[in-house]
Image (cartoon, rainbow, N blue to C red):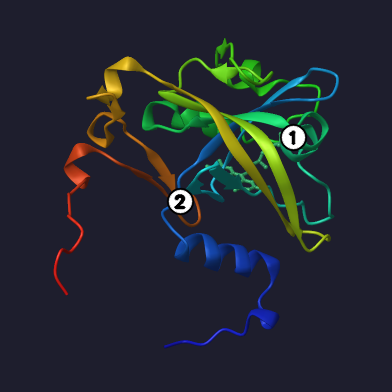
Amino acid sequence: MAQFDVASLSTHERSAFITALVAPRPIAFVSTLSASGVGNLSPFSFFMAAGYSPLSVAFAPVRSRDGREKDTLRNVRATGDYVINIATYDLVARLNQSSYTYPAEVDEFDAAGFTRAPSLRVRPPRVAEAVAALECRLFQVVEHGNGGASASYVIGEVVHIHVRDDVLVDGIPDNRRIEHVARLGANAFARITPATLFDLARPTEP
Ligand SMILES: Cc1cc2nc3c(=O)[nH]c(=O)nc-3n(C[C@H](O)[C@H](O)[C@H](O)COP(=O)(O)O)c2cc1C
């Protein structure tokens, strides 16, 4: 096995290693509003869910090398609410375009060609084209470091869920009807199709 002391890796190398190894990652396609009401829409693959009561989710904007916060983080801090739209293969080209570093006054809904749909419990709109959307209230931002390339974990509670009727089976979202798209290292993505899925029941014996 090759050995790598993290202290000797550059920021670029750390990013290349961790995104290739902690993979595949789901993508939170996050819509927010600034304090003055300007919309923002950006993808974040440092994204996870854990815990059902409260229904808890976290994503992590990383600061730029010179320590600047992303607009999404600034908006979430200012307003306390956001929507996590679910990323699927049909959206991936426009979703990728929305990750371009537009000025704060540009709304990526318009820049990347998405349609706003109203949310019910939070102010930011959801993405009409998304198969599902999670309306979230901010619980806490946890900073791990505070300099360039450091992480801010945005932990939130899901307070309302939208799901397109055609992906529900017996009232539950069915993964054979949702073509999720996931992020890996470098520019790699994965497309989840019914052919790539398999079922495995939990063990019932030691
Ligand atoms: C698929 C994908 C996943 C991404 N995941 C993250 C992430 O987890 N954290 C992050 O800081 N940036 C991530 N980015 C980059 C941000 O989307 C990009 O910096 C975006 O412009 C941030 O926008 P904002 O400043 O408007 O919030 C990702 C980009 C793509 C295309």
Mark 1 residue element: helix
Q: Which mark is residue 76?
A: 1
Mark 2 residue element: loop
**Quarter assignment of residue 101:** top right
**Quarter of the N terminus within the rendering:** bottom left
Q: Position of residue 172 (x, y in %)?
A: 30, 29
Residue, disc 2: 25
Q: Residues within 10 Å of mark 1 (few under 14, many from 20)?
A: many
Q: Residue at x 28, y 17 (%)?
A: 166
Amino acid type indicated by mark 2 = Arg
Residue 174 against residue 107 in the figure, above or below: below
The residue nearer to you, when weighing 173 against 103, is: 173
The residue nearer to you, when weighing 96 against 171, is: 171
Q: Residues within 10 Å of mark 2 (few under 14, many from 20)?
A: many
The residue nearer to you, when weighing 201 against 176, is: 201
**Quarter of the C terminus within the rendering:** bottom left
Specify whether tag 2 is near ligand 1 (CB below 8 Å).
yes
Q: Quadrant of ligand 1?
A: top right
Q: Is residue 148 left or right of residue 7?
A: right
Which is in the foreground here, disc 2 or disc 1? 1
Q: Position of residue 93 (x, y in %)?
A: 47, 30
